[in-house]
Amino acid sequence: MRLLQHNPMAVGLNIMDIVITSGKFTAFAYLVEGSLLEKSLRSEFSFTLFAPADSAFTSLPADTLKWLLEPQNEQRLAAILRYHVVRGRLESKQLERMRTARTEQGQELKIDLRQTLLIDSARIIVKDIEATNGIIHGIDSLLMPYAVATAVL
């Protein structure tokens, strides 16, 4: 997969605005828009977002996204979205020295640095996109908390 390019024009935008305007995270933006998480990602509080690139959604089974968008699965979808967010601003250099990071969903993401920086099993494909209220790292797959993943799959 080709690395996404850092957008220097993103200066002055909050995390949510960058996710929406970048054109690289449209599926994730669609899922977040209108949620409580969107309000957080537009707030003055600082966050790190591991944003799945649009290509991350192509590897999902065909009906998974449709199933998650059903009203009875609203809590599961919210848990998945919050699992992509860590409170505070964590640059890639900081992540390289960490083993875990607690998500807004409540569980911890595993951080692994072997040949590349991995968050759970997702590879970071673009690092350190600056926002006024934190930082974004583009990843190549959708992250799922264990309990939700077992229900989805």
Image: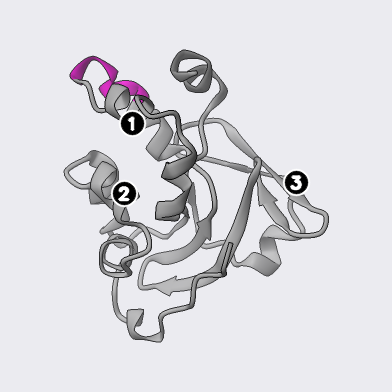
Which mark is first along the chain, 2 or 1? Answer: 2
Q: Position of residue 100 (x, y in %)?
A: 69, 43
Count residues near mark 2 (Cα–Cα under 10 Å), then give few for <14, some for 14-19, many for 20+: some
Q: Amino acid at mark 1?
A: Leu
In the structure shown, which secondary structural element does the residue marked by tag 3 occupy? loop
Residue to which mark 2 is pinned: 27
Q: Nearer the viewer, mark 3 or mark 1?
A: 1
Residue to which mark 3 is pinned: 99
In the structure shown, which secondary structural element does the residue marked by tag 2 occupy? helix
Name the residue furthest right: 114
Query: Are circles 1 and 2 on residues that touch, CB within 8 Å?
Result: yes
The colour style of the image is: one colour
Q: Nearer the viewer, residue 151 or 91?
A: 151
Q: Which mark is residue 65?
A: 1
The structure residue drawn at horizontal position 21% and vertical position 47%, both measured from the top left corner, is: 33
The structure residue drawn at horizontal position 66% and vertical position 41%, both measured from the top left corner, is: 121
Tag count = 3
In the structure shown, which secondary structural element does the residue marked by tag 1 occupy? helix
Magenta region: 71-76
Which mark is first along the chain, 2 or 3? Answer: 2
Q: Quadrant of residue 115?
A: bottom right
Left or right for 57, reference 13: right
In the rendered structure, does residue 123 fall within the stretch colored magenta?
no
Left or right for 52, reference 43: right
Left or right for 37, reference 81: left
Vertical order, 8 against 146 (above or below): below
Q: Nearer the viewer, mark 3 or mark 2?
A: 2
